[in-house]
Amino acid sequence: HRPLDHLAFRYPGSKLVDIAANPVVAFEVDGRHGGHRWSVVVKGTAHRLDRDDMIESSGVLRLPTATSTEKFNYVRIIPTSISGRRIR
């Protein structure tokens, strides 16, 4: 595994104006593994990826997506804190 130095994810275009005005964000991911549930929160500064080389090098194009619609806007979070918990 590589160390986490950034997180890139697909983001709906309607939220980009909000991120530009206030780039301090929190991103939460929840999941289940075995008999446990878990939650991770990444807090940091969001930046729109606006160049093809930035998008490609982020790896976001290789991530699975819940919808088959084409994506045009991508955001990277530069983390200031990462926290998580496991829930039994």
Image (cartoon, rainbow, N blue to C red):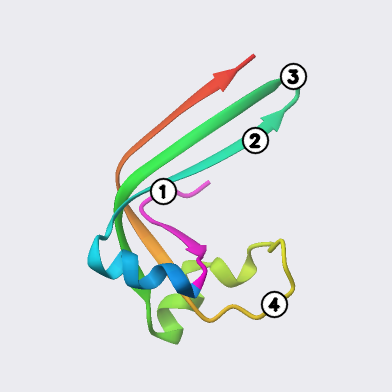
Q: Which residue is mark 3?
A: 35
Q: Which residue is mark 1?
A: 4
| Tag 1: amino acid | Leu
Residue under the point 33% across and 51% down: 25
Magenta-drawn segment:
1-12
Going from N to C along the chain, the mark reached first, 4 or 2, is 2
Q: Of tags 1 and 2, which is closer to the observer? A: 2
Q: Which mark is residue 31?
A: 2
Q: Position of 16 compared to 13: left or right?
A: left
Q: How many marks?
A: 4
In this rendering, which labeled residue sits more in front, label 3 or label 4?
4
Q: CA distance from mark 3 to mark 4?
A: 33 Å
Alpha-carbon span between mark 3 and mark 1: 26 Å
The residue carrying mark 4 is 69
Front position among marks 1 and 4:
4
**Dominant SS type (magenta):** loop
Earlier along the polypeptide chain: callout 1 or callout 4?
Answer: 1
Disc nearer the start of the sequence (3/1) = 1
CA gap between label 1 and label 4 equals 28 Å
Q: Are marks 4 and 2 in contact (CB under 8 Å)?
A: no
